[in-house]
Amino acid sequence: MSDLEFMQAALAEAAKAAAQGEVPVGAVVVHQGQIIARAHNQPIATHDPSAHAEMLAIRAAAQQLGNYRLSDCELYVTLEPCIMCAGAILHSRLKRVVYATNDAKTGAAGSVINPFAEPKLNHQTHIESGLCQHEASALLGDFFAQRRAAQKKTSRDIEIAGLNNLRDLGGLKTADGRTVKTGMVFRSEQWFGLPESSLKAAQALQLRSVWDFRSYGEQVRHPDPHLPGAENYWLDVLADTEQTLAFDVAQMLERPDLLQRHLGNGGAEQMMLALYRDLVASPTAQQVYAHWLNTICSTEQYPLLIHCTAGKDRTGWASVLLLSLLGVPHEAILRDYLSSHDKVIAKYQPLIERCVAAGGDIRILHAIFGVQAQYLKAAMHEVKKQAGSMPHYLADVLGLTANLQAALKERLLSE
């Protein structure tokens, strides 16, 4: 095996840490060209501040060899070791350490301090860095971005047990200084399987209409509950596109090899980009969204709920269309769109953890279950391709008249 393969094994361990809510750092110890120990960060799970990936891997390697001296071994780790781990590396006398990316805050291989360069020490460990730096940095960046976003829960989010991605579209400001009314339009994931207590809590929303953008198969397998006083509408946004059947998610979660074969090496992102282009360009999607926007001009529709399965793609694009029509700036629309990422990832975390534990690539899973700015960018590029701009797309492609758009603004905006 090569240095690259060893570091990829360490990255796989880091992905396991991320799936478990730990800082994504992974490590492997190599002896005579073979991996003899693998580990990832586990301080939270073990209530042990010393349970860093390097420490755990070094301990496991020493047990494997029956010797606390690892002078014939090499350590591959995804993040520059801290001072604690640097001490363990020196005491175990590892001959070589390769790490992927620097740690500007606590790095003890040169970023902050460097005991490895101390000439008074009896043992010298050879240090190399930069291998798979982009991949390791991306894992860490995604993890901390998601943690920060999770801590920024807004007043627009609505707490109902079983619903991670339920929020009010109200409260957003338009470019001309008006505000989208609260309590009028809500967006979420599917409601199938909610306990009676959650359905009772949802009555506070006083919903009059529920719009389901899922496929026929999704609707049959997981039908919406009946909410008192609300009328249910079902419109299959992607009825004329293969994207809804592009892969069997359940099967691939059980078979990580299939996941890698069909959606690895950027395939998951490409599939999602194609899906978003279809949301804009497919005739059925255009008809569905046009019908929805025309229908919700009626007073009897409000308050209303829009949803699909995860509440991020089909529902996300519906929200983009409505907010764009109302005059909300694109930057605010993008922030609202991206806020679904952590909510949906949290919803599917048990599935993600099982798949990663079986060898699945967390980057593929996050690409499928999450949202990315590039997805919305692909949709907006398709809008420009179809009509030149969003206002022209709404008017010329979806056929929304000036009177209808004015009526929706009158209905949903306040001074």
Image (cartoon, rainbow, N blue to C red):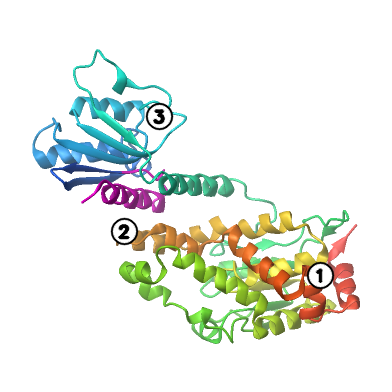
Q: Does 412 appear in magenta?
A: no
Question: Is 389 above or below relative to 117?
Answer: below
Q: In which quarter of the image is the C terminus?
A: bottom right
Looking at the rendered structure, the kind of residue marked 2 is Ala
Which percent across, then down, holds residue 312? 59, 66
- Was residue 8 drawn as part of the magenta stretch in this picture? yes
- Please tell me whether the stretch drawn in magenta is mainly helix, strand or loop: helix
- Residue at image position (18%, 41%) is 60
Q: Is tag 2's residue or tag 1's residue first in the polypeptide sequence?
A: 2
User: Where in the figure is residue 366, as x and y percent of width and height?
Assistant: 47, 60
| Left or right of residue 82, residue 237 in this image | right
Mark 3: give few (<14), some (14-19) or many (20+) Cα within 10 Å. Answer: many
Mark number displayed over residue 61: none
Picture quadrant of residue 354: bottom left
Q: What element carries label 2?
A: helix
Q: Do the residues labelled 2 and 1 touch (CB within 8 Å)?
A: no
Q: Who comes first in sequence, dot 1 or dot 3?
A: 3
Q: Give the range drawn in magenta.
A: 1-26
Q: Which amino acid does label 1 sit on?
A: Pro
268 vs 351, nearest the viewer: 268
Crowd class of label 2 (few under 14; some 14 to 19; many from 20; radius 10 Å): some
The answer to whether residue 7 is left or right of residue 94 is right
- State the separation of the CA atoms marked 2 and 3: 28 Å
Q: Residue 357 carries which label?
A: 2
Q: For the residue marked with disc 3, what is the amino acid?
A: Gly
Regarding mark 1 in the picture, which secondary structure is present there?
Answer: helix
Q: Name the residue under label 3.
A: 107
Residue nearest the viewer, comparing 57 with 165: 57
